[in-house]
Image (cartoon, grey):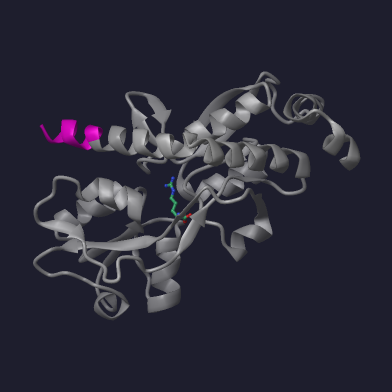
Amino acid sequence: MKNFFRAAPFAALAAAALLSGCGKSGDSGKIRMITEATFPPYEFREGTEVVGIDVEICKAVAAALGKELAVEDVEFDSVLPSLIANKAELAAAGITVNEDRKKMVDFSDPYVETGIVVISAKAAPVKGADDAKGKRIGVQNGTTSADWCVEVLGQEPDRFDSPASAFAALKAGKIDLVVADVDPAENLVKGEDAYGITSEPRFLTSESYAVAIKKGQPELLAVINKTIAELKASGRLDEIFAEFKAKADALVASEEE
Ligand code: ARG
């Protein structure tokens, strides 16, 4: 079987064998991506549609498989459990690769190197772990930011359903700082005078994002890795990043009007 896939003129044949007859997705013309769409520029809503970098990556994977992409939006802490429960074939939600998650799912090659940062009032800047300790910290539930609070500070954060609702609590004076991934954090502080990214050095962690799939599907993993490699090599991935960062920022600007 393995050799067959290696010898096959790639995606089309592999895809057909992969996704037909596995009986997982009821609609064999579609491949389902599960995400949590409050995370610009990776996934966010433009009107009712979920768009973003992760959606574009998964669309390219779907195209390589000869399928159309269907996107499902759930709470972040349900993304991997839903994948494992066969509610989708792909999970892409700015998901950081880590050892705990590797026990549950298989990850593709990473498509970005990134990390988490602090957002706080510029007038009372929180720079890092020492400053943050004992303060009220807001995070999106289920994220590596929540893990950072527990593991590095030994402290329970206030858990919110999105980075934006944590930021709203900061602006309302209910918490002292937000810990979040750098790209959604940059989007949140766009156009804000009083709040900014205050961590110094900027990153509290170094993390990388990858697409997750249910364990034990080497052929599907190979299609995803090949797609990511091609997007990188062609420069298309850089274009996707630029396009959706600009779109997400424009959305903030239009909300401020
Ligand atoms: N990178 C962080 C993590 O994996 C946060 C991801 C949050 N993603 C989202 N779509 N809300 O834990």
Among all residues in the image, which is located at the extreme bottom? 130
Residue at the (77%, 39%) spot, across then down = 219
Q: Quadrant of the C terminus?
A: top left
The answer to whether residue 244 is seen in the rendering is yes
Residue 49: percent from the left, percent from the top?
A: 40, 24
Residue 25: percent from the left, percent from the top?
A: 69, 27
Majority secondary structure of the magenta segment? helix
Camera-nearest residue between 38 and 242: 242
Camera-nearest residue between 164 and 43: 43
Residue at the (40%, 62%) spot, across then down = 145
Vertical placement of residue 60 versus 181, above or below: above
Camera-nearest residue between 122 and 168: 122
Residue 58 among those drawn in magenta = no
Tell me if 183 is positioned left or right of 211 in this view: left
The answer to whether residue 172 is seen in the rendering is no
Vertical placement of residue 162 versus 34, above or below: below
